[in-house]
Structure formats: C-alpha cells, structure tokens
Amino acid sequence: MISVGERPNPGYELEVVEIGEERDEGAEITVRERWPLADRVYPQVVSYPSVLAEILGSVRVWLLQNGQRLPFE
C-alpha cells in the first residue's frame, strides 16, 4: 500500500503514473498526488489517498512532483 497520509478533504487523489520493469532491486512505481481543483467545493471530511497493489518482490516508489521524480518517503 502506498499512502500520502491524512488530507482535509476528498479532493486529493493518488495516481499511479508508471510501473517500471523489474530490475535487480525490484519493480519501480511512480505515483503523483493530485490536489483539489481550485474552483470546486469539497466536503470537509478527512481522507487518506492511497493505492493498493500486489507485487511480488521488492518495490521502489517515486513521487512525481513538479515534473521531478523524487524518492517517496
């Protein structure tokens, strides 16, 4: 499971951008967090954007932010 933690409304989303080929270190997954649209109103409820997948072996996760791939921590 990949999660970005608690967010203040359901306008936040976590999206899988790319799943790379398995290498010696394992598969590589790139995700992107989408922020709420500025012109929309969202209910004020806590949400936990996440992605769930089953992958055998080790995985390295990257966060795509402002066009850069950063290690996901």
Image (cartoon, rainbow, N blue to C red):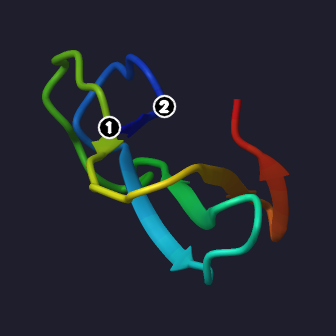
CA separation, marks 2 and 1? 6 Å
Residue type at tag 2: Val
Where residue 65 sits, quadrant-wise, is bottom right
Q: Position of residue 35 (x, y in %)?
A: 48, 48
- Tell me which numbered mark, 2 or 1, is placed earlier along the sequence: 2
Query: Which residue is located at x 43 percent, y 21 percent?
Result: 5
Residue identified by numbered label 1: 49
Q: Residue at x 62, y 76 (%)?
A: 22
| Extreme residue in the bottom direction | 21
Question: Residue 13, percent across and down?
Answer: 35, 50
**Label 1: which secondary element:** loop
Residue 28 spot, x, y in % from top left: 64, 66
Q: Quadrant of the C terminus?
A: top right
> What residue is pinned by disc 2?
4
Mark 1, Cα crowd under 10 Å, few <14 / some 14-19 / many 20+, is: many
Nearer to me, 44 or 3: 3
**Which quarter of the rendering shows the N terminus?**
top left
- For the residues labelled 2 and 1, say whether their Cβ atoms are less than 8 Å apart: yes
